[in-house]
Amino acid sequence: MYKIPHPDRAAVRARVGVFGLFWLLGITIGMWSAGLPSLNDRLGLGAARLGTVLLLVAAGGLVAMLLAGPLVDRFTSRKVCWFAAPASAVLLLGPAVAPGFWWLAVLAVVFGLGIGVVEVAMNAHSVEVELRYGRPIISAFHGVWSLGGAVGGALTAAGLKAGTGGQSLLVAAAIVVPFAYAPFMRLLGPAAAAPVASSGRTALSGTIRWGLIALLGVAAFAAHLAEGAAMDWAALHARWVLGADPALAPLAYTIFSVAMTAVRLLGDPLRARLGAVRTIRLAGIIATCGYVLVLGAGAVPESLSVVCAWTGWGLAGVGLATVIPVIFSAVGASGGAVGRALAMVTAFGYTGLLAGPAVLGFVAQSSSLPIALVIPTAFAAVVALTGAPAIRALIPAPAPVDEAAAPAARAH
């Protein structure tokens, strides 16, 4: 039977602090996304310019992720979080007050830089806290990030409802900024956050082999591509391919999102029992089965097609929910250079999230959306094929427990 370890007080406090970091970034991203329509109305951007702004935010984030890894390894994740997380909230004020497109373009890059740095730093600190905790806890952090995004969107919507008009993003950001430093008093201190040695170390000098980082990066890319496909195309698939009612079509993504969030919030005990290798293999299989159901929805009777697709999107959300937490946890448990490794894996995943939906759009335009959705189906299978062997190489199976010594160990 799985025995839950009892973490010390510093680890418990740090866990609360990391929850705060993920919550803060989720709210910031949620406010940014929900505030785009009002930003577009205020500056009269249009689809092309708004798309350019989004691309600039993504480019800034990608560059920052690659730079953040060495910063975390040199200055610790705590120090980088101390500056980067509040900065990401403050930097949201830039696009909110931009007087025109060119100013917005510059400030969008800066905003993306802030988001990229805090993404790497807070995830690095989360793996340090998990090591200190002694059991899986990372998945719930990502679930709180999703909830924060929903709250951020609601804050922005409330600002619009209150009549703030094009300044809704400014009002929502101003609500978050005063609370930006709240989580940091609970993070692990320099002594407590020192890297924990692990028997899973895979190379000399405490460095994870680049081949393993690349393999984990491929798994992260595949998972994020499949997630991005659901975000941007689930509702459109229900409407265009299955002929769902316009009011029901958005439920396809809602079901995916709710399933993913729920599993992230509740999935840590399951990962503790199954182990990282079995969890990521099962995650890839479940996500693949979900996408197969989505693809098959068009072939079943019309009365069942939407329900079949909803079931598929739900399974895809359940499977993809644990992939990134498992990968990040494995990097932390390896005992290697966490900052650089996490930065590379995060950059891989971020690229999949950005590029995937666009590629699907081009394929759908030239052929059909069902054919385009074959791509995330295949990449969901790639998660299991690449993630499981990479994690097995990072974290060798634990040595068998000496049953005779177990009672004495439990007594301590």
Image (cartoon, rainbow, N blue to C red):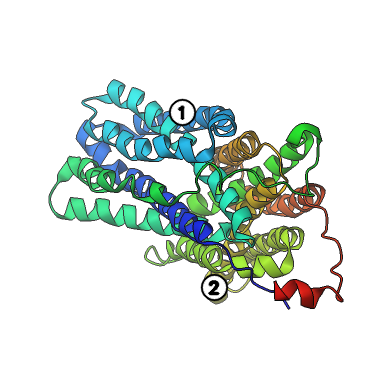
Q: Earlier in the sequence, mark 1 or mark 2?
A: 1
Q: Amino acid at mark 2?
A: Val
- The one nearer the camera, 143 or 165, is 143
Please state the horizontal and vertical placement of residue 67, each as a whole percent of the image: 54, 27
Residue 284: quarter of image = bottom right
Disc 1 to disc 2, how far (Cα)?
40 Å
Q: Nearer the viewer, residue 261 or 131?
A: 131
Task: Look at 31% across and 41% down and name the residue there.
Answer: 36
Q: Where residue 122 sits in the image (x, y, percent)?
A: 50, 44
The image's mark for residue 307 is 2
Seen from the viewer's position, the closer of residues 186 and 58 is 186
Q: Residue furthest left?
A: 163
Left or right of 300 on screen, residue 159: left
Question: Residue 286 location, x and y as percent?
Answer: 68, 64
Q: Residue at x 56, y 45 (%)?
A: 193
Q: Which residue is mark 1?
A: 60
Mark 2: few, some, or many residues within 10 Å (few <14, many ≥20)?
some
Q: Of tags 1 and 2, which is closer to the observer?
A: 1
Is 219 left or right of 183, judged from the image as shown? right
Q: Compared to 1, does 23 lie above or below?
A: above
Amino acid type at image mark 1? Gly
Percent coordinates x, y for residue 342 in the rendering: 62, 40
Q: In the image, 121: left or right of 104?
A: right
Q: Is residue 249 visible?
A: yes
Pointer 1 with pointer 2, Cβ within 8 A:
no
Which residue is at a point 57% across and 59% down the rendered structure image? 139
